[in-house]
Amino acid sequence: MSNRTLLYIAIALLSVLLLIIAGVIVFFVLNNEVDDENTDGKDNETTEEDETENIITTSEQPDMTKFNEYFTSIELGKLPIGVQVGPPNGIPQAADEFNKDIDQFCTNMTIIKTIPTNSVSAVWYNADTKSNLNNKVTLPQALQIGGSSGCESIISTAGRYEYKIYVDDVLVADLPFQVE
C-alpha cells in the first residue's frame, strides 16, 4: 500500500472515531438536560390529582375571545393604604389575599386595544353567599393601550370573593381573592 492510501485510511478511521465521540457527547448532554428538568426525582408525568390541586373554580367562566381582543393580562394586586398608584413606590404587587386594615385592592391590566368610555365595568361577588356585594360600577373613561393599574378601598369583611370585570357587559375576568 502506498503512503497516500494509508493516509486516506487513517483520515477515514479518525473521522469515524470523531463521529462516535461526538455522538456519545451529544447523547450524554441531551440525557443530562432531561435529568436537570426533573431534579425532584419524581416522574414528570402529571396525574389527575396534580391537575385538580391547582384548579380554582369561580362562579362564571369569562369569555376568552372578548378578553383576548382587549387584554394580554389582568391580575389583582395590593398597595398599602395611603400609597398612590404610580412610580416609585406605587406599583401594586400581585396578590389574592388582602387585609382590610392595611391593604388597598388593586387591579393591574395590560391592554392591547383601546377600550371606549363607559365600556369597562366591575363588581365584587361574595363566593360564600353567592351574591354581588355591590352594584356593577362602570369606568367613565376610555382605557388606552399599555399598562393600567387602579386601586380602591376594600369594601368587604373577611371572606372569599371574586372580582368580575366586564367589557360591554361581557365577562372578561373572574378573579378569586380572599379578605382576612
Image (cartoon, grey):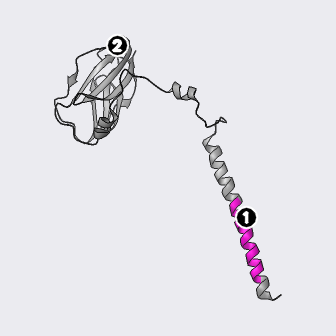
Q: Mark 1: few, some, or many residues within 10 Å (few <14, many ≥20)?
A: few
Q: Secondary structure at mark 2?
A: loop
Tell which residue pokes out farthest to the right in this image: 1
Which quadrant of the figure has residue 7?
bottom right
In the rendered image, residue 82, in percent from the top left (x then y), is placed at 28, 23
In the rendered image, residue 130, in percent from the top left (x then y), is placed at 34, 13
Which quadrant of the figure has residue 136?
top left
Q: Is residue 33 left or right of residue 8?
A: left
Does residue 16 belong to the magenta stretch? yes
Q: Which residues are magenta?
A: 7-23
Amino acid type at image mark 1: Ile
Does residue 117 belong to the magenta stretch? no
Q: What secondary structure characterizes most of the magenta part? A: helix
Q: Is residue 70 visible?
A: yes
In primary-sequence order, the first of circles 1 and 2 is 1
Q: Which mark is residue 20?
A: 1
Residue at the spot 53% in from the left edge and 29% down from the top edge:
51
Q: Mark 2: few, some, or many residues within 10 Å (few <14, many ≥20)?
A: few
The residue carrying mark 2 is 130
Residue at the spot 39% in from the left edge and 18% down from the top edge:
178
In the rendered image, residue 34, in percent from the top left (x then y), is placed at 63, 46
Residue at the spot 31% in from the left edge and 35% down from the top edge:
67
Q: Nearer the viewer, residue 56 or 179?
A: 56
In the rendered image, residue 15, in percent from the top left (x then y), is placed at 71, 72
Q: Is residue 62 left or right of residue 8?
A: left
Q: Which mark is residue 120?
A: none
Q: How many discs mark residues in the rendered view?
A: 2
Residue at the spot 22% in from the left edge and 17% down from the top edge:
135
